[in-house]
Image (tube, coloured by chain):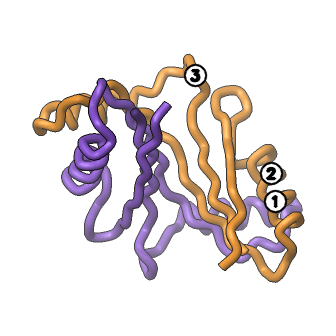
Chain colours: A orange, B purple
């Protein structure tokens, strides 16, 4: 069982790293990009638990540690493999 | 048109940040997690182009700038909105 977690900045929060990447892409000739927002992608593997339990642990991890509730939002999906 | 890009370390590449997060979760009482791997999640918005063109630009951006071909792999999806 595995969780795929996506964390990104809330709307309205400045993202200087994204702006820098956007300019860098423009500078190397890659055009047509309106904006770039940088976030985090986290993969979490579990030891023999149910999908519901995995979902619960993932949500708790995001709330208590991974995402900053003031500036970031998170979403995740649980995949079996 | 928007691209969602996921960049993660290749198998076998050490991820000290992931290890640290894994220990931190354990320390605050969140158990049953086998491993944590940190990666990047990037959202890219485009100015009025086709889905095929967006896909091409995203792939080029990953190859030329966003992902380190030596240590990272990337995948992406193009969503219309």
> Relative to residue A67, is residue A57 drawn left or right?
right
Q: Position of residue B44 (x, y in %)?
A: 39, 36
User: Is residue B15 positioned above or below B24 on the image?
Assistant: below
Residue located 72% across and 66% down the image:
B23
Marks 1, 3 in one chain? yes
Mark 2, residues whose alpha carbon is within 10 Å: few (<14), some, or many (≥20)? some
Q: Is residue A45 visible?
A: yes
Q: Nearer the viewer, mark 2 or mark 1?
A: 1
Report in which chain the residue with disc 1 lies.
Answer: A
Q: Secondary structure at mark 2?
A: helix
How far is mark 2 from mark 1, CA to CA?
6 Å
Residue located 42% across and 36% down the image:
B2
The quarter of the picture where the C terminus of chain A appears is bottom right
Q: Position of residue A20 (x, y in %)?
A: 30, 31
The residue tagged 3 is A11
Front residue of this view, candidates A46 and A32 = A32
Query: Looking at the image, is mark 1 or mark 3 earlier in the sequence?
Result: 3
Q: Secondary structure at mark 1?
A: helix
Marks 2, 1 in one chain? yes
Hey, which quadrant is residue A23 in on the image? top left
Front residue of this view, candidates A50 and A70 = A50
The residue tagged 2 is A59
Q: Are marks 2 and 1 in contact (CB under 8 Å)?
A: yes
> Relative to residue A51, is residue B53 drawn left or right?
left
Q: Are marks 3 and 2 in contact (CB under 8 Å)?
A: no
The residue tagged 1 is A55
Report in which chain the residue with disc 2 lies.
Answer: A
Q: Position of residue A36 (x, y in %)?
A: 38, 33
Q: Position of residue A55 (x, y in %)?
A: 81, 59
Q: Are marks 1 and 3 in contact (CB under 8 Å)?
A: no
Q: Secondary structure at mark 3?
A: loop
Mark 3, residues whose alpha carbon is within 10 Å: few (<14), some, or many (≥20)? few
């Amino acid at each position: 069982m595995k969780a795929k977690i996506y964390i990104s900045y809330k709307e309205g929060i400045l993202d200087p790293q994204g702006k820098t990447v956007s300019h860098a892409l423009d500078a190397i000739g890659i055009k047509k990009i309106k904006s770039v927002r940088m976030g985090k992608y986290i993969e979490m593997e579990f030891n023999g638990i149910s999908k519901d339990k995995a979902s619960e642990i993932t949500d708790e991890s995001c709330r208590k540690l991974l995402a900053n509730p003031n500036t970031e939002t998170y979403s995740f999906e649980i995949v079996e493999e």
